[in-house]
Image (tube, rainbow, N blue to C red):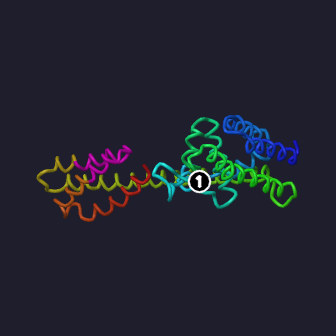
Amino acid sequence: MTKYEELTAFLERAEELIDSKYIIADVKIANLLKTIALSNTLLALFKNCLTDFDYAGAQKKYLVKSQFLSADKGEFVLPPNSRELLAFIFATLIDIDAKRINMSEFITKYFYVDGSFASGYDAFITGMIKPFKNTVKMLMESVIDGKLQDPVEALNEEEKKREKERAEKEERDAKEKELLEKTYGVSVKAIKELLVEDKQKVRNGKLKDKNDVLLVIDMLANVIESEDKDAIEYAFVAYRYLAIAHRLTFWGRVKKISKYLKDIVNAI
């Protein structure tokens, strides 16, 4: 189909919904959605509108509590721009068609007029469906006249842009991982060298509790490659208190090892 034929088919289905009674509205909504699905241009238009669209957030913004009616009544607030309008109403119609939204309850709650369901249904058509139809018509006519970029082209460009961003992010993540792994390895090696020096100093020294001190040093040496943050933290706490108890033997060690441990923990 040409873009003009796609628009014509959409307008016909939209008018059928607008002119229909509630009893067959679900059929007319299904027909309207099928027409959109069969149109490359319309489908691309809606995909563009739905990109990064927060439907749950939009429901809170555009389906609000009524200021003048009872607590169980609400009202529909028309979205302020065409992108939000098309995305929100399209998503709502999808939910109605899929029975995730009970159409009767939806109309009764958000399009209440005077207690008459017929009046509520008319308000639903006037407040939601007509603006939806008119906005699609306006945008499609701009596309046909060349005033607006073809939605299919726009969607392809957006997909290429996202693919490029995804590839760039993967590359950045890989480089960061490589850097962290490199830093991790260097830091592990540095700590082990310091702990070997500690053990040598303890063996050559005159500490009375050498075996206990060596046990704490070995515990830290054994866990720094475990990728267990809790175990590393536990072992370092023990080492820190050991250094406090033997300040002269372990002078300046806690500060040095803390710096390297930070690199290891960040890389895990």
| Residue at 70% over, 39% down | 21
| Residue at 79% over, 56% down | 138
Q: Kindly identify the amino acid type of the residue bearing the numbered disc 1.
A: Phe
Coordinates of residue 207 in the picture (x, y in percent):
14, 55
Up-down relation of residue 61 to residue 108 (above or below): below
Q: Would residue 126 be found to the left or right of residue 202 on screen?
A: right
Magenta segment includes 226: yes
| Residue at 78% over, 45% down | 15
Coordinates of residue 118 in the picture (x, y in percent):
64, 43
Q: Nearer the viewer, residue 96 or 193?
A: 96
Residue corresponding to mark 1: 76
Q: Which residues are magenta?
A: 216-236
Coordinates of residue 257 in the picture (x, y in percent):
32, 58
Secondary structure of residue under mark 1: strand
Q: Would residue 176 be found to the left or right of residue 11 on screen?
A: left
Name the residue furthest left: 208
By secondary structure, the bulk of the magenta-drawn segment is best described as helix
Up-down relation of residue 145 to residue 1 (above or below): below
Up-down relation of residue 266 to residue 40 (above or below): below
> Which picture quadrant has residue 142?
bottom right
Q: Nearer the viewer, residue 32 or 23?
A: 23
- In the picture, the quarter occupied by the N terminus is top right
Q: Would residue 181 be found to the left or right of residue 5 on screen?
A: left
Q: Would residue 258 be found to the left or right of residue 89 on screen?
A: left
| Residue at 19% over, 63% down | 247
